[in-house]
Image (cartoon, rainbow, N blue to C red):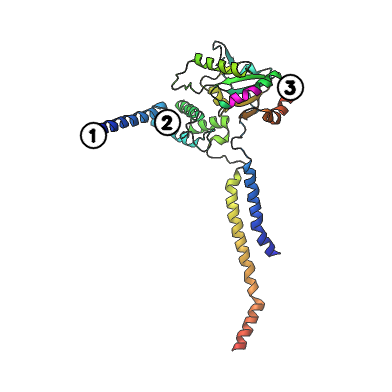
Amino acid sequence: MRVILSAIIFMLSIGFNVQLLATQDKFQLDEPQKTTLFLELTKELRCPKCQNQNIADSDAMIAVDLKRKVHELVKKDYSKQQVIDFMKQRYGDFVYYKPPVNPMTIWLWLLPILFVIAALVSIAMSRKRQSPEINDEQLAKAEAILEHEE
Amino acid sequence: MKKITIYLTPLLAFLAVLGFLYTGLFSDPRDHQSSLLEQPMPKFELPDLMNTQQTYNQDIFLGKVTLLNVWGVWCITCAIELPYLNQLKQEGKHIVGLYYDQDIDPDFGIKTIERVQQEVTDKLNQLGNPYAFNIFDVKRNLSLDLGVTGAPETYLIDQQGKILLHHIGDINPRVWNKKFAPVYDLLAVQ
């Protein structure tokens, strides 16, 4: 029994090792900072086929192709922005998770700010309107009542 | 008067959200236009699928209005689309195939070209051949330059080799009449 168990554990551990090596070997880079850049880019680029995954997570063929391209470009000393531009030129702004600021997308940032400002203004206005209403007449009336009671 | 506006505001906000979400029901997240529209065909140098000795480049699109159809035998929707492409061919349209294979992974290449050719011949014998010829995108580099996300996809290229339309998904009479026909007919007149 123990022999079988240890054999199973041994085989499993070999399996894991091989898998680990395979994913690392597929896209190798010599310099560590290039490896970091490659990993960073594959996390930030979006798979055009399965749209809620980045290309690092996705196993779609297109994602593998994009990974290979990123690897190739990083190897050719492309900077991060150059790789992103390369991809955007082919797949549009869509392929990068961070949207560009343009007349249409600027509202993503402006709307929350405008909302806060509008809310503050409306609160301030309603405060102002309420305060004078209690004054003059009501105050005189209240004083009269107080005097009368005394 | 003031009370009415206070009561109406949530209702109006609700209607606005309703309208926004309702239009969202009919929007297709996959339907984003290629960023290559109005651009010339990317440069390439690729072999013919059936005769790898012969190579093509971007100049083969000059002088003719072309439908460039991205496909593969492994793609089920492509097989459904083929009969309609055959009909378009009979109407005199110039259709070129951009073929790519899933099994030829440039990292772990295993499938031979002969086997790919045999599969394509079988498929086209069975369903008809709408293609003037097929460009074999060996390493899927041209597909990547074209912004292809899968198959089938179709590009409309004008006489100057400029990309005018990019359609993701199959071509059927509805898509043709709505999307392609207006542009194509205008080109054919010129």
- Per the image, the residue denoted by label 2 is A34
Query: In the rendered image, which quarter is residue B190 located in?
Result: top right
> What percent of the width, then of the height, locates residue A63?
50, 30
Q: CA distance from mark 2 to mark 3?
A: 50 Å
Outermost left residue: A2
Residue B17 highlighted magenta (yes or no): no
- Residue range in magenta is B77-84
Give the mark toward the camera: 2 or 1.
1
Dot 1: element: helix
Query: In the rendered image, which quarter is residue B84 located in?
Result: top right
**In the shown orientation, is residue B102 left or right of residue A139?**
left
**Numbered badge on residue A2:** 1
Outermost front residue: A1
Q: Residues within 10 Å of mark 2 (few under 14, many from 20)?
A: some
Is disc 2 in the same subunit as disc 1?
A: yes
**Numbered badge on residue B188:** 3
Disc 2 marks a residue whose amino acid type is Lys
Q: CA distance from mark 1 to mark 3?
A: 78 Å
Disc 1 marks a residue whose amino acid type is Arg
Q: Chain of mark 1?
A: A
Give B126 or B11, whichever is nearer the viewer.
B126
**Numbered badge on residue B119:** none
